[in-house]
Image (tube, rainbow, N blue to C red):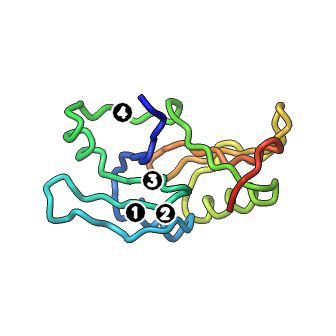
Amino acid sequence: MKPRVSVLTLGVEDLEKSLEFYKNGLGLPTEGIIGQEFENGTVAFFDLQNGLKLAIWERKSLAKDANVPISPSSSSEFTIGHNVSSKTEVDQVMEEAKKAGAKITDPAKDTFWGGYSGHFLDLDGHLWEVVWNPEWEIED
């Protein structure tokens, strides 16, 4: 398998609320909800960097498409890392997320490895880490 991850899909309970959170709360670019003409096909895509997309899809539709049972959600199985250019930017993104309705689980602070990070849960309990790593150069 070649390393070609191109879409991260999150199962959500309420597509409209999640769209509002990611589009207006976090400011991610999107064309909005598409696929409404298909049974279990309603989805929204957000443009990230270098062609990477974030998709939100109703949990029940995602489970049906993958032929797996809907299971209880768990915030401790997967983290989405959002790397930024400075400690100040970590604080700004954390505040944006909080204002959008995210639950701050770990306020931003200096890390043991020399960086700075904080964690929040989105509206469906997906865990995000906002992080500044002094060893990484971030392209805008």
Disc 3 secondary structure class: strand
Query: Viewer-nearest of labels 3 and 4?
Result: 3
Q: Residue at x 61, y 59 (%)?
A: 97
Q: Left or right: where does residue 4 sit relative to residue 49?
A: left
Q: Left or right: where does residue 9 sit relative to residue 91?
A: left
* Residue carrying label 1: 17
Q: Residue 62: name its quadrant.
A: top left
* Residue 140 placement (x, y as % from top left): 68, 62
Tag shown at residue 72: 4
Q: Residue at x 27, y 35 (%)?
A: 70
* Residue type at numbered disc 2: Phe
As drawn, the residue found furthest toward the front would be: 2
Between 121 and 63, which is closer to the camera in this rendering?
63
Q: Left or right: where does residue 26 sit relative to residue 140?
A: left
* Residue type at numbered disc 1: Lys
- Pointers 4 and 2 in contact (C-beta within 8 Å): no
Q: Residue 41: name its quadrant.
A: bottom left
* Image quadrant in which the N terminus is located: top left
- Pointers 3 and 4 in contact (C-beta within 8 Å): no
The correct choice, above or below, for 105 with respect to 77 in the image is below
Q: Earlier in the sequence, mark 3 or mark 1?
A: 1
- Cα–Cα span, label 4 and label 1: 20 Å
* Residue carrying label 3: 54
Between 20 and 135, which is closer to the camera in this rendering?
135
